Amino acid sequence: MGQPLQTYRKNNDVDRPASIVLFAATLLNTALAFSNSLLFPVNSTIASVAQLAITAAAIAVAVLRRPQLPLSFWIACACLGVFALLASIWNELNSKHYYDLMVIPIFIIFGSVIRQFPFKAFKLIIAAVGVICFLDAFLVGLYTTLFNPLSFFRNTRVWVSDQLASGSDEMGLYLGANRGGGSFFGFLTDHRIGGPFLEPLSLGYFAVVACMFFAVWFRHYPWQRAGAFAACLVLALLADSRVPSAMIILFFGLSCLQSHIRMAWSAWGPAIVLIAAFFFYMMSDGRLAESETPRRIAITFDVVTSTNIFELFSGALNVSRFGDSGILYLVYAATLPGMLLCLYLFSGVLSSTRLTPPILPLMASIYITTTALFGGAFLSIKTSALLGIMLGAASVGAVRSKLKARSMRKQPAPFSQPGYKPDLGAVGQQATN
């Protein structure tokens, strides 16, 4: 047994760049919406510059600290770049396509160089989410005064402004806050909660990513883990997010069995989800279904089943055909092989080491593949930063269970020793031990 690569210490040795980047990325839209509502108008240019600044800061820190991830990760990144270049031959890709392909890998790299996972920043984020969700649920007037999500999205999203007449943002809530057919969990509130993320879907996705962390951090504390998962489920229910709610329940079941989970299982995650979704599509009424879920899944498989092999492999798809499908968006930006590579790269399967808790890439692969069937929202920096940092930190052992962390508090941090070089192949160092 070698010494662990990264340790948790309850002293003042806080990795400030990691804390700042995580906090800023997760609550970026919250800050921009507050500014737009009470300080100065925010447009799409300001929002894009702020997002790029946070991403650039993560890149700068990663470069200075010399990331050491498995060779498979770097090969996958290079291959993804080649696939994107091939896709650009047939498709008119823009900077957003390239950014979306890079954002999660960038934060995985950043997470791999942090000295310790920013627990304090994560706790502050959880507190902010709870408080602002409370305002959204029970003090709607105050919430819309402080943030006015509809005004913010009108100023920063062209498709929102195209749907709204002048002055129609006075109601304040996001367009999707009131579902056309009524909320599935409408007994909780009279509208879908977006909280600090301003729109419900991102709140649901954040709840799923947060529960992945709790599955590892509270591994040896079943009651605390159950409480944390329950809190995440409440957030997903408040957002009226059905798929995230189902994933949280599934991940809780997996967390109870994580001592039996093997790393190789994560390789099957995307395949199982896609096959299950295809069978669901075949058994449902597709776009004609009354429920929203089969209609959304049908967007992907209607195109796949009616497109020739060349168009799929080259990504030469008509943009107007695939609508809101993250799977088809990735095919368009990186070809079919590139899309499949993205599912494994974004979920940390290719950045995992012996230190990575096997349950983490398994949950991430299910999350990435499932959410990609319902659009590209999983690529938003609001949730992708937390996911990427968590996966990157896990690759070098900086994400550990609470019990393991407590047992290591008095051990010297190896990264603080002169000449320290991480040995990613350390034998026997399983973070799930």
Image (cartoon, helix red, strand yellow):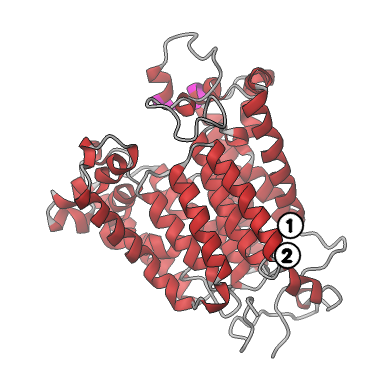
Residue at the (26%, 43%) spot, across then down = 299
Magenta stretch: includes residue 119: no
Q: From where the camera sits, is residue 182 visible?
A: yes
Question: Can you give x and y, in whole percent of width and height, for residue 87 in the image?
Answer: 27, 53
> How many other residues sit within 10 Å of disc 1, few (<14), some (14-19) or many (≥20)?
some
- The dot on residue 119 is 1
Q: Quadrant of residue 163?
A: top left
For the N terminus, give its image quadrant: bottom right
Q: Secondary structure at mark 1?
A: helix
Judge from the rendering whether residue 384 lies leftward or rightward of residue 270; answer left or right.
right
Pick the front one: 330 or 142: 142
Instruction: Mark 1 and mark 2 in contact? Answer it, CB < 8 Å.
Output: yes
State the count of labels. Answer: 2
Q: Which amino acid type is marked by label 1?
A: Phe
**Magenta-colored segment: predominant secondary structure:** helix
Residue at the (59%, 71%) spot, across then down = 395
Among all residues in the image, which is located at the extreme top? Answer: 167
The part of the chain drawn in magenta is 154-159
Question: Can you give x and y, in whole percent of width and height, for residue 28 in the image?
Answer: 62, 38
Q: Which amino acid type is marked by label 2?
A: Gln
* 148 versus 230 height, above or below: above
Closer to the eye: label 1 or 2: 1
Residue assigned mark 2 = 116
> How many other residues sit within 10 Å of disc 2, few (<14), some (14-19) or many (≥20)?
many
Pick the front one: 292 or 363: 292
Q: Secondary structure at mark 2?
A: loop
Residue at the (25%, 55%) spot, across then down = 278
Q: Quadrant of residue 227?
A: bottom right
Among all residues in the image, which is located at the extreme front? Answer: 187
